[in-house]
Image (spheres, rainbow, N blue to C red):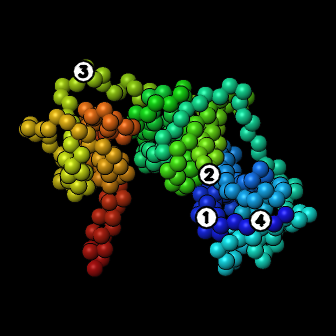
Amino acid sequence: MKLELNKNELERALIALGKLVSRTASLPQFRSLKIEAKEKEIRFSTCTPLEQITFRMESPPEGSFHCIVPFEEFRMALRSCRNKTLELEYREGVLRVGETTLLHEQSVEWPIICKGEQEAYSELPKEFVSLLATAAPLVDREEARAIMRGINLSREGITATNGRELLHISLPLNVDDFTIPLPIALLQTRTKEGGSLFTWNSRAGKICRVETEHWIWLAYGLKGDYPNWRQIIPHPNSLVRSVSFLPERGEQLAVFLRNVPAQEPHNPVEQATGAISPSGSIGKCFSACYWRGIRKLRLEMVIIRSLQPEAQDAMSRCLCISRKLRNPNLFKLKRRNQKWKTRK
C-alpha cells in the first residue's frame, strides 16, 4: 500500500505529537508512533500512561494497514525527505518513509482506551484550546498534590489555581468536576477548530475525549478532590462596586499593567473614584495579558462584566482573584548582579 501526504502539514503535527514522547521511557510504546490507515484517512498517535493524542489526515482509499515505529526514527526520515509530498509505503511489516525504511515493532502493546456506554457530551467553541492556554500558566507542575497539577472542568467552566492565584473562565460544559492533566500536547496543536467534549466513568477512573476536525485527545482524570474555589468567590449581591470597561479602555488598561514594575516598592496599583463609562467589557485582552504572567500585581478583585448581550462570551465574564506575588527569578538576578559588582 502506497500513500502520498503533505509533508509540511505532517511536520507541524509531529511537534504536538512529540510532546507525549519520552526518549527515556522503559516501555517502548511511550517512545513510539502508531500509524493507522483506514476509511479514507490516516492517523498518527502517541501516548503516555495518562494521555493519548491522535492527528488525522485525509488519504486515498487504497486499503488499510497498522504499524508502530520509533518516533525519533520516523521524524528523522521525514526531515530527510526533500519533496513537499511524502510517500508512505507499507509492505509485509516494513514501512518506507521517502527513501528510509523502518521496521514495524510487533512486540509493542499499545494501550487502548475504550469508549464509555454513557458519555456526557458538551459542544466546544472554537477558542476552547486558547482558553486552556490562558489557564495553563497558573498550573504548578511541581506541586506535590497531583490534583493541583491539572485544570478543572465543571458546569461553571474552566478553573485553574496554584494556591496563590485563581482563574475562572465561565463556559457552559456538561461536566461534573473533572480535573484533566495539563494538556501540553493539546495546547501545542493551537487548533482553532470547534469540537466536542465527551466524559465518562470506567473501572480505571474518569476519562475525557476532545475531538476536533483533525485532532483527538484522550486523558484520564486526576484522582482527588479539587479545591473548593467557589467558596472564595463573593456573591454578586455582596459586591460594593462593579466596574465595566469599553473595549478601547480595556486595551489601555492592559498596556498600563504591562508597564508597572514587578518589584517592590514600585508595584502598587491604587483605585481611585471617577467617572467610568457603564458599558462594554474589558474582554480577552486584559485576561491574556495579566494571567500569562507578564506582571504579577496586587489586585484584590476584578470582576469583568459585559452589558452588551452580543459580547457575553467566555472571556468577557471571567473572574480573576489574585494576591501579590514576588518574582523569585527577578530577586535572584538582582542578587547575582550585586555579587558581580562587588567582585569587580
Vertical side of 78 occupied by 289: above or below: above
Quadrant into which the C terminus falls: bottom left
Foreground: 21 or 195?
A: 195
* Mark with earlier residue (2, 3): 2
* Mark with earlier residue (3, 1): 1
Residue farthest right in this picture: 92
Q: Are marks 2 and 1 in contact (CB under 8 Å)?
A: no
CA neighbours of label 4 inside 10 A, class few (<14), some (14 to 19), many (20+)? some
* Mark with earlier residue (4, 2): 4
Q: Are marks 3 and 1 in contact (CB under 8 Å)?
A: no
In the picture of the structure, the residue carrying the numbered disc 3 is: 238
Q: Quadrant of residue 242?
A: top left
Three-letter code, disc 1? Glu
Tell me the element at label 4. Answer: strand
Three-letter code, disc 3? Ser
* Residue 91 circle label: none
Q: Is residue 179 visible?
A: no
* Mark with earlier residue (4, 3): 4
* Mark with earlier residue (4, 1): 4
Structural distance between the alpha carbons of marks 4 and 1: 15 Å
Structural distance between the alpha carbons of marks 4 and 2: 18 Å
In the picture of the structure, the residue carrying the numbered disc 1 is: 9
In the picture of the structure, the residue carrying the numbered disc 2 is: 214
* Picture coordinates of residue 135, whole percent (x, y): 43, 44
CA neighbours of label 1 inside 10 A, class few (<14), some (14 to 19), many (20+)? few
CA neighbours of label 3 inside 10 A, class few (<14), some (14 to 19), many (20+)? few
Structural distance between the alpha carbons of marks 3 and 1: 52 Å
Foreground: 156 or 164?
A: 156
* Residue 3 circle label: 4
Tell me the element at label 3. Answer: helix
